[in-house]
Image (tube, helix red, strand yellow):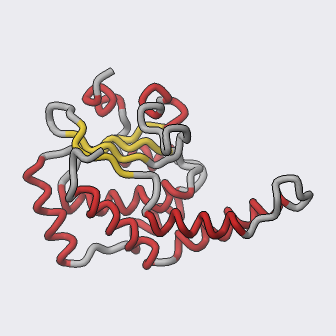
Amino acid sequence: MQLNDWFEKGMTYEQYVDSMNVNRERMLDIYERVELSGEEKAFFARAQEKNWRVIVLTADWCGDAMLCVPILKRIAEAAQFDLRFLIRDENLELMDQYLTNGKSRSIPIFIFIDQQGQQQAVWGPRSPEVQRMVEEMRERLPDKEDPQFEEKQREMYRAFRDRISSNPSVWQTVIDSIRERLTQPLAN
């Protein structure tokens, strides 16, 4: 399938939100609270002339998607990007073209395409700062053989979800990272 076909297959933002079962409230809370500065709005508004659309590979159970999707929605409003959402596990043919480090089906992945369906930029699954945060948290986990590993890992994910859903400085790293990516299109 071509990227235009994937885009047409996707759900609108409203359909995606209506389908959510796991992180809906936290995602919507981030959406309500995240704000672009006037300068950021102006930057993203200049992207309107590109007339791009965005395919979003996501899943509502994903903490990173809970963080990044509402931020992308705010950016899309400023840039007038049309968004379409595809659930990762239902669209592995596309997902497997955007593996993180060539092996992981990490999400979200934002695929920016032009009106002809040509890929112009790809972003995801995390800002570099959020990636470092995850790596630091994982370093504190016991070995996988440790009887407490699973419990400690669940605690880590809970702490991660709490931090990213409540900390505007984390949100800013996502805005900055997406902005940086959109200033260097086609360098996929």
Residue 98 seen anywhere in this rendered image of the structure: yes
Image coords of residue 30 (percent x, y): 45, 68
Q: Quadrant of residue 163?
A: bottom right
Position of residue 96 in the picture relative to residue 62 (left or right): left
Position of residue 142 in the picture relative to residue 188 (left or right): right
Residue 82 seen anywhere in this rendered image of the structure: no
Query: Which residue is rendered at x = 47% and y = 62% of the image?
Result: 67
Please name whichever residue, 114 or 177, is drawn nearer the observer in this view of the structure.
177
- The quarter in which the C terminus is drawn is top left
Image coords of residue 15 (percent x, y): 40, 43
In the rendered image, the residue lying farthest to the right is 147
Position of residue 86 in the picture relative to residue 112 (left or right): right
Image coords of residue 96 (percent x, y): 47, 31
In the rendered image, the residue lying farthest to the left is 49
Image coords of residue 151 (percent x, y): 83, 61
- The quarter in which the N terminus is drawn is top left
Q: Quadrant of residue 178?
A: bottom left
Query: Which residue is rendered at x = 28% and y = 73% of the image?
Result: 36
Height in image: 92 above or below 130? Answer: above
